[in-house]
Image: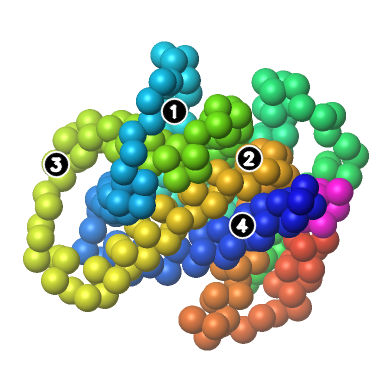
Amino acid sequence: MHNEEHLTGHIAALGTILIWGTTYVSTKVLLTDFAPIEILFLRFLLGFIALFCVCPKLIRGLTRQQELIFAEAGLTGVTLYFLCENIALVYTYASNVGIIISIAPFFTALLTRWLLHEDPIGWAFFIGFIVAMAGICLIILNGTANLQLNPLGDMLAIFAAFLWAIYSVLTRKIAAMGVGTVASTRHIFFYGLVFMLPVLYLMDFQPGLDRFVNPVNLGNLVFLGLGASALCFATWTFSVRVLGAVRTSIYIYLVPVITAICSVIILGEQLTLMSISGIILTLLGLLLSQR
């Protein structure tokens, strides 16, 4: 049973990353009619409603400290992470952000060891990290100009990766509370939406219901809200509970791989020797880190 649960955890993490790796297409389409903060708020509002319909029972009996952990998870993993990532894209190249965000597993490993005192990090993790990062650099920089530093944007991307590491540690703590996966994910979304409200007010959010008449907009919002948010955050939380924060976060290495494959299938781009080499190195790094 233990091995079967671990296998389910790996499948859930892989499935989550497969969906997250394709969300850039939906987000890019929606940016024509929606601001980034509007997309962020609407997708998580839709995700919250969906999770509430699946599990309407409220979580009771939480201590003030446990409630604070949920609030911190909503702030770091939902509100601040996505805001920092989106703002970073304004100030720096997408290639920079893609590479920098991929260091999140490294931060997760350090924080997990420091804060949760879990098993020591083995040499295989660090070798796998170096190999995977080399592969990710080849994939993302394939056919583009040399990597250029843009201090503000790059620092925001580093902060976003660090925020995701904090979120991973917090979800590990939440898993130890014994709260159901769907209920805990819904509670995290609630706090994430609450923390977004001041940003919506500052950015003069306008509902603009006419934009939802467009079936393309509606379809992409449903995909982001139900698939990439409600489903994927729940499956990610499940994987963290079963595999631990470090093993689960390592699957983030696959996002650039999936993006590269989607570019071939959806956008008709060609796989080059550099991108193929990058994919192979990234997969090798993932296998090494999972040891």
The residue that mark 4 highlights is: 12
Badge 1: residue crowd in 10 Å (few <14, some 14–19, many ≥20): many
Quick one: label 3 or label 4, which is nearer the N terminus?
4
The nearer-to-camera label among 2 and 3 is: 2
The magenta stretch spans residue 122:
no
Q: Residue furthest right?
A: 123
The nearer-to-camera label among 1 and 3 is: 1
Q: Residue at x 83, y 34 (%)?
A: 121
Badge 2: residue crowd in 10 Å (few <14, some 14–19, many ≥20): many
Q: Amino acid at mark 4?
A: Ala
Magenta stretch bounds: 285-291
SS at badge 4:
helix
Q: Is residue 137 visible?
A: no
* Residue 122, percent from left and from top: 88, 37
Quick one: label 2 or label 1, which is nearer the N terminus?
1
* Residue 158, percent from left and from top: 57, 38
* Residue 162, percent from left and from top: 58, 34
Quick one: label 4 or label 2, which is nearer the N terminus?
4
Q: Indicate the quadrant where residue 218 lies.
A: bottom left
Which disc is residue 70 wearing?
A: 1
Q: Residue at x 42, y 69 (%)?
A: 25
